[in-house]
């Protein structure tokens, strides 16, 4: 199911900036703003644009301003729709391992502590948890977003 979502879901607002930040990390230019993409997300998602040899305009105003959102939008916007879909899918694919690893660990530890049936139930609950179902196939932050007070 997560593989299906990784292919069929549209691009979220943050994914181009995560791709740009990850790509910059792999290029040794990890200075993009905002710097809210965790290192693991950069490492896991950044190798795909590098392997696909996606062009980054280093002479653009976005690169000079170190704006990950604009760089990511330019990076993806310069691609054909087919190549953009492939880039997004391949960059999302490694993130599917994280929910599966969580379910495996809950099954394993729950089985050792409380018995095989409880471990299986814990793994099933984890895989049916809404946040995992919604975000398990996306290039997303690996920590909760900070709330911002208005007014």
Image (cartoon, rainbow, N blue to C red):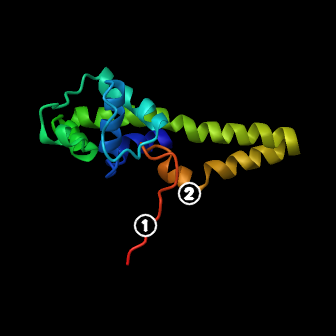
**Residue located at (52% from left, 55% from top):** 144
x and y percent of residue 97 in the render?
Answer: 55, 34
Q: Which mark is residue 64?
A: none
Which comes before the other along the chain, label 1 or label 2?
A: 2
x and y percent of residue 104 in the render?
Answer: 68, 37
Q: Which mark is residue 130?
A: 2
Secondary structure under tag 1 reads loop
Residue that label 1 marks:
148
Viewer-side residue, 6 vs 74 = 74
Is 128 placed left or right of 29 in the picture? right
Separation of marks 1 and 2 at Cα, in angstroms: 23 Å
Residue 147 visible in the displayed image? yes
Is 120 placed left or right of 138 in the picture? right
Secondary structure under tag 2 reads helix
- Extreme right residue here? 114
Within-10-Å neighbours for mark 2: few <14, some 14–19, many 20+? few
**Which one is closest to the eye, mark 1 or mark 2?**
1
Viewer-side residue, 6 vs 36 = 36
Q: Is residue 148 above or below residue 58?
A: below
Q: Is residue 53 above or below residue 138?
A: above
**Residue located at (70% from left, 45% from top):** 123
């Amino acid at each position: 199911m997560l593989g299906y979502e990784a292919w069929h879901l549209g691009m979220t607002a943050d994914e181009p900036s995560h791709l740009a930040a990850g790509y910059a990390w792999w290029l040794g230019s990890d200075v993009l703003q905002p710097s809210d993409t965790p290192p693991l997300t950069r490492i896991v998602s950044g190798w795909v644009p590098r392997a696909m040899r996606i062009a980054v305009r280093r002479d653009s105003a976005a690169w000079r301003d170190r704006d990950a959102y604009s760089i990511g939008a330019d990076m993806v916007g310069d691609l054909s729709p087919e190549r953009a879909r492939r880039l997004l899918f391949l960059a999302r694919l490694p993130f599917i391992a994280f929910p599966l690893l969580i379910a495996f660990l809950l099954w394993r530890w729950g089985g050792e502590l409380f018995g095989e049936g409880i471990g299986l139930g814990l793994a099933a609950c984890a895989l049916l948890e809404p946040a995992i179902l919604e975000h398990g196939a996306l290039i997303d932050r690996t920590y909760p977003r900070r709330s911002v007070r208005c007014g």
